[in-house]
Amino acid sequence: MKTTILIKGTHCHACKALIEDVCKEIPGVESCTVDFKTGATEIQHNNTLNWDKLKQEIENLGTYKIERVIQ
């Protein structure tokens, strides 16, 4: 499955790399691609993904906030 979320607070390549690395460690995430300019983040995942865990891990990185699910 593919879901796109909007993450506020991304602004550089380091943000992109940090979020993508953390997402890869979360069970159920198959891949993650962040567009740091817009915050649009595409998550390829299976149905075992715990969305609360994903949100918590991303927001615990610092200044990032998951705003909404785009699709």
Image (cartoon, helix red, strand yellow):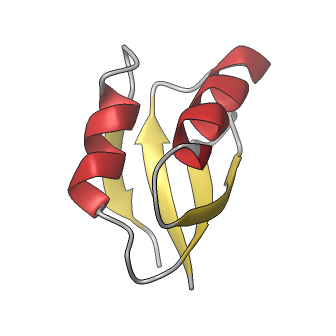
Asked if residue 62 is positioned above or below residue 19 in the image, the reply reads above
- The residue at the point 21 percent across, 54 percent down is 52
Q: Nearer the viewer, residue 28 or 36?
A: 28
Image coordinates for residue 9, horizontal then vertical, percent: 46, 24
Asked if residue 42 is positioned above or below residue 38 in the image, the reply reads below
Q: Quadrant of residue 21?
A: top right
- The residue at the point 29 percent across, 61 percent down is 51
Image coordinates for residue 69, horizontal then vertical, percent: 38, 66
- The residue at the point 40 percent across, 34 percent down is 58
Q: Work out which quarter of the rendered image holds the N terminus and state it.
A: bottom right
- Left/right placement of residue 34 relative to residue 29 reads right
- Left/right placement of residue 1 relative to residue 14 reads left
Task: Give the residue at the far left of this rendering.
Answer: 52
- Left/right placement of residue 3 relative to residue 21 reads left
Image coordinates for residue 42, horizontal then vertical, percent: 62, 62
Asked if residue 61 is positioned above or below residue 54 in the image, the reply reads above
Q: Quadrant of residue 7?
A: top left
Image coordinates for residue 25, horizontal then vertical, percent: 54, 43
Q: How many discs mark residues in the rendered view?
A: 0
- The residue at the point 62 percent across, 42 percent down is 38
